Amino acid sequence: MIDGELGSFLRSRREAVTPGEVGLPAGPRRRTPGLRRAELATLAGVSVDYLIRIEQGRDTHPSSQVLAALAEALDLSDADRDHLRKLAAISNGKELCPTARPAARTVRPAVRAVLEQLEPAPAVVLNHLGDLLAWTDGYDRLARPLGILDGDRPNLLSFTFADHRARTAYPDWDDIADEQVADLQGGGCAPNDDLRLLTDRLARDAGGDFTERWDRVGAARTRNGIMALLHPEVGVLRLAFETLELPDADGQRLVIYLAADSVTSAGLDRLAGRHPGALRSLGTA
């Protein structure tokens, strides 16, 4: 399912750009609103045959100069350029993620010490598969009543796509699902047995809800933002989140959640058993 992602990503971006956005006339008899291969090749200064080979996955080692020219011609966003660099690195074999080694499910002692310092804020460490590896008590109070931490090896994608409670927990379920698939695709490691098992299971349990998102290829990862969560004890919470990439071979990341408004701040205080106002929202001076 992962082979050829570099070409698929470039093709998806070419098809999403209109001629007018890059200064070209639309012209007659255009079957799709996107750029033709010949138009992109001309803008980037490469041959049409070479662009076809890249898009079809027959050339997985384009030079950095060619990728830079294509990114410039497509006017890619910073997030898309970052994703393109990751895909190019994977295609060129520069990512040191051995396929035979299973995904790590432990975190370093120093990372656990960081989690302790973050209390009572909700914070969690995940690996590139979305396995929840370690978390604060604040995250436990937030996530356990929703079912996210059920089982011996809780996984964020398994909850989102295979647990019926997720659609209630996430008022913006579609956005959350898109972001989690983007995280899985952009985790930085080459395909391995753990990843194949996970994607096969999600495809079986969630069907098109997962496979259609996976096949889109190339969504930029969301490292920060605001998400809504419907908690059974305190109602709707608006949580600002920040994602910190950890220097671990399997793409571990630390996600920290903060109150995005005073109502959420009061809700987190209630979950923590604190007096209202103990946890200040981002909007508080």
Image (cartoon, helix red, strand yellow):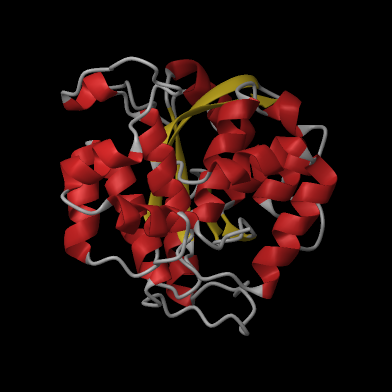
Q: Give the percent coordinates (x, y) of residue 223.
A: 39, 44
Location of residue 197 in the rendering, given as x and y in whole percent from the top left corner: 75, 65
Compared with 170, 60 (above or below) is below
* Number of marks: 0
Q: Residue at x 61, y 39 (%)?
A: 213
Relative height, residue 116 to residue 283 (above, below): below
Depth check: 88 or 277 in front? Answer: 88
Q: Nearer the viewer, residue 26 or 131?
A: 26
Query: Which of 193/35 is in front?
Result: 35
Q: Quadrant of the N terminus?
A: bottom right
**Residue 142 image position (x, y, % from top left):** 64, 38
Q: Is residue 160 in view from this perspective?
A: no
Give whichever of 93, 139 is nearer the camera.
Answer: 93
Using the rendered view, name the quadrant where residue 27 is placed.
Answer: top left
**Image quadrant where residue 165 sits:** top right
Q: Does 252 sit above or below residue 174?
A: below
Q: Position of residue 140 (x, y in %)?
A: 65, 47
The residue that appears at 23% across and 67% down in the rendered structure is 63
Residue 236 visible from this viewpoint:
yes
Which residue sits at x=52%, y=71%?
Answer: 190
